[in-house]
Amino acid sequence: MPVQIELPFHFLPSERTSYRFFSFYSFSAFLFGWLLFVLVFTARADTSIEGPPGYEYIFGDEFSGSELNQELWGLGINEKNLQNEGVDCVYKIDNIEVGDGLLVFTQKREPVPVMGRSWSREKSFNYSSGGVHTQKGYELRNNMYLELRCKLPQNNAGYGAFWTMSRKLGNWKPEDLLEIDMFEFIAAKEKTRLWSGLWWHDFRAHELHEGIPRKFAVKRSDDHFFINEQLYKAHHGHGHYIKGNKVNFYDFFSFGIRVTKNEMFWYLSQHGPAWKSEPYFKFSGGKVHNRTYGKVDDFEWYREVPKDLYAQVILNYAIRNAEWAGGPVRDEQLPSKMYVDYVRFFKLTN
């Protein structure tokens, strides 16, 4: 039943006052509605998927569901879930959660060692964590922009990475098979480091310098060799620190990489799309060298951006007990988590 309020006589509106009152009320309602629309529209615009000018969104993951999208993502850093040598954890689907708009990797000590495989052998792991790679058909290619927003961990021996490995698709050549380190991150707070770079693992026969021991050159064909020792691989990188960086990696930040036919650009931003910031690193082709650390001879090669790139995208949260990577692990800091807000792929349209 409507509530009736009786006003004293001197508060009762006249016909003219009543007209003004309801006109004011109507205008106020209109103004309120308009402001509400603007606020809602602005809020939606702030969370919209915005790519660089000339690029359109083609696929990605906002992690808005309740489980991992297995059409897009596979477990581990490769199809067989093999661990890299020197990594001290196995990747398990139980350590990967999707909820509240986030992908979460949890790193923990296992009560009982878990069996897994590295590239060289089967072994037991005392620790487990999360890692995923894009399935076939979801590659980073030329004339694309890729952006991720995440919050990195801060435990000793924690090692977060966002990177790619080339697939042998299209008109590939040995020198076009490269690893793109979009970023690698040492999570130990006293050794916080984020760096980016490129590695080439594959070489033509004439590129094998005499100083490279042949035991490290695995023959794929008469004119294709894979180098399996890091000291003898070609590298291009900016080093361990980003000059002038003001991004807090322990809060959510955005990272982006743009690949054209001839150049690659890396971007960082605390707020908003990463591409709106100035690139902190780029590669335009030229001479590259092995990363020697003064241990072996310095060798030189010439490399360009692959013209037919098919790069499998990898996102993982590893444990590395090595001192250079922020180890050894401290069990009292576990379990520890790494958070991903979204991963978005854009394609150049003009």
Image (cartoon, helix red, strand yellow):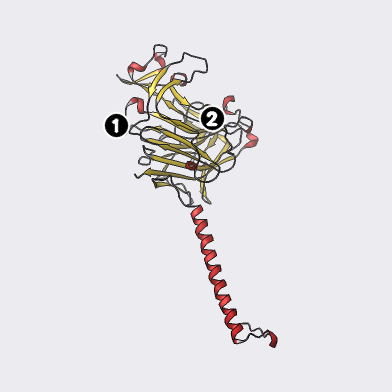
Hey, which quadrant is residue 194 in on the image?
top right
Q: Is residue 215 above or below residue 315?
A: above
Residue 13's disc number:
none
Question: Which amino acid does the dot numbered 2 rest on?
Answer: Asp
How many numbered discs, if any?
2
Residue holding disc 1: 171
Rendering coords of residue 183 (x, y %):
50, 34
Rendering coords of residue 272 (x, y %):
52, 46
Foreground residue among 346 and 68: 346
Q: Is residue 201 above or below residue 334?
A: above
Hey, which quadrant is residue 72 in on the image?
top left
Residue 88's disc number:
2
Is residue 77 among what the camera can see? no
Badge 1: residue crowd in 10 Å (few <14, some 14–19, many ≥20):
few
Is residue 98 among what the camera can see? yes
Q: Is residue 233 left or right of residue 124?
A: left
Rendering coords of residue 248 (x, y %):
59, 39
Mark toward the start of the polypeptide (2 vs 1): 2
Dot 2: element? loop
Q: Is residue 204 left or right of residue 297?
A: left
Circle nearer the viewer, 2 or 1: 1
Q: Are marks 2 and 1 in contact (CB under 8 Å)?
A: no
Foreground residue among 320 and 2: 2
Question: Which amino acid does the dot numbered 1 rest on?
Answer: Asn
Q: In which quadrant is the C terminus drawn?
A: top left
The structure residue drawn at horizontal position 57% and vertical position 79%, both measured from the top left corner, is: 22
Rendering coords of residue 7 (x, y %):
68, 85
Q: Tell me how far mark 2 sits from mark 1, CA to CA.
A: 36 Å
